[in-house]
Amino acid sequence: MSVVLSADEASELLKASIAGKLPDARGRFGPYGGRYVPETLVPAFERLEQGIADHLHTDDFQKEFRSELKNWVGRPTALTFAPRLSERWGAEVWLKREDLAHTGAHKINNAIGQALLAKRLGAKRIIAETGAGQHGVASAAACARVGLPCRVYMGAVDIERQAPNVDRMLRLGAEVFPVETGDKTLRAAIDEALREWVTDPEGTYYLIGSAVGAHPYPYLVRELQSVIGQEAREQIIAQAGGLPDAAFACVGGGSNAIGLFYPLLGDAEIELIGVEAGGTGDGLGQNAATLATGTPGVLQGSYSIILQDENGNVRETHSISAGLDYSGVGPEHALLQAIGRVTYVAAGDQAALAALEDLCETEGILTALETAHAYAAASEWAAKNPGKRILIGNSGRGDKDMPTLKQHPIRNKPNAAT
């Protein structure tokens, strides 16, 4: 359920979004977004908002940012045609390979951009949160690159299921702080990072990892991640001879999805499909399908769609993928659903595992469990739309998920996990 908009309101908001006029001056994406934060953090948010206005789109900052993307991150990432997967699905499948970026996922685009900004704003240290660990790894690497100390908050549950990334963060020089409160996953990690920021809002910079939270974070993350869609659009025209019929991306908080979708919003012929975590079922606590089953509310500084009960208590979630295991979603995604520009669906744990195996078997690519949800939905769409051209945001690689994958036997190889 989302806020109901009239056809005229939806049309005007879509035009504003395509024209780059959202968020507005209040940090609103239509009815969503805004800033709901403790009074002690208001000056820090205002300072960040002014810093973005002063630096983000200047020639000097963009030159430095683009240089780091090219020479350190390894951009542009490849656009890969998937011939055997295409044959299996009966479609023309192209993959935007964020798994080939430095540290193995799209998260590094945002992390290095915010780290450069934090340096310009005079920060003495950086804190971050992480679920799947990829943002934590990216933040640790970016902080090492710019020479700032880094502390990463991570739920105890996620620390256990993302052990390889925890070790990577430590080796990159970050301190990893285990969060034992709440649901011990991403939501709890964000809560803890915000509590830490309150204690030192001037010397500490909070490097948020997704397009969530209070204004200006959803805007900032979108601007830094839009390089994904900008590259993909140019690449698919050059390599395939035209735009895709549909583009898919997984959605937790929504940074990789907004990065892919935002530059494509004006291409009306492209169907945009975001894929949430369907978990093990439709019941309370069985999934993280926020846009499919959530209701409007405030979570961690922003008015968006969240998973909450009838009394407004935020629900705990479940997903086999740590990065999608979140009770909210970015406010821009809530708007894009409300105006009908993006369709949001859910894929369950087992469907994601099967899609991951399909990709491994046909293309030799081990994708992240988060990304596997996008493949699961794309395969279903392909079956109903034979012969169409599909673009999938391959947001990260699956090395980090081996502890989880080892608990699930490989299809047709029942003893492989033992």
Image: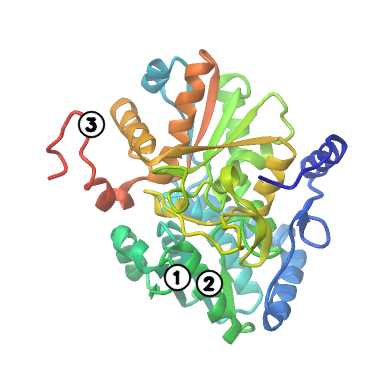
Give the number of callouts. 3
Mark 2 highlights which residue?
Answer: 191
User: Which is more N-terminal, label 2 or label 1?
Assistant: 1
Specify the amino acid type for callout 1: Gly
How packed mark 1 is, by other alpha carbons closer than 10 Å (few <14, some 14-19, many 20 or more), is some
Residue flagged by tag 2: what amino acid is it? Asp
| Residue reaching furthest to the front | 310
Viewport quadrant of the C terminus: top left
Tell me the tag on residue 280: none
Badge 1 vs badge 2, beta-carbon distance below 8 Å: yes
Q: Which residue is mark 3?
A: 411
Q: Residue at x 26, y 49 (%)?
A: 402
Q: CA distance from mark 1 to mark 2?
A: 9 Å
Q: Earlier in the sequence, mark 1 or mark 3?
A: 1
Q: Which residue is mark 1?
A: 182
3D distance between C-alphas at marks 1 and 3: 35 Å
Q: Position of residue 279 (x, y in %)?
A: 41, 45
Q: Residue 11 or 121: which is nearer the viewer?
A: 11
> Secondary structure under badge 3?
loop
Indicate the position of residue 404 as horizontal and vertical percent values: 28, 50
Residue 5 position, x and y percent, is 80, 42
Q: Nearer the viewer, mark 1 or mark 2?
A: 1
For the residues labelled 1 and 3, say whether their Cβ atoms are less than 8 Å apart. Answer: no
Along the line of sight, which residue is nearer the eye, 149 or 10?
A: 10
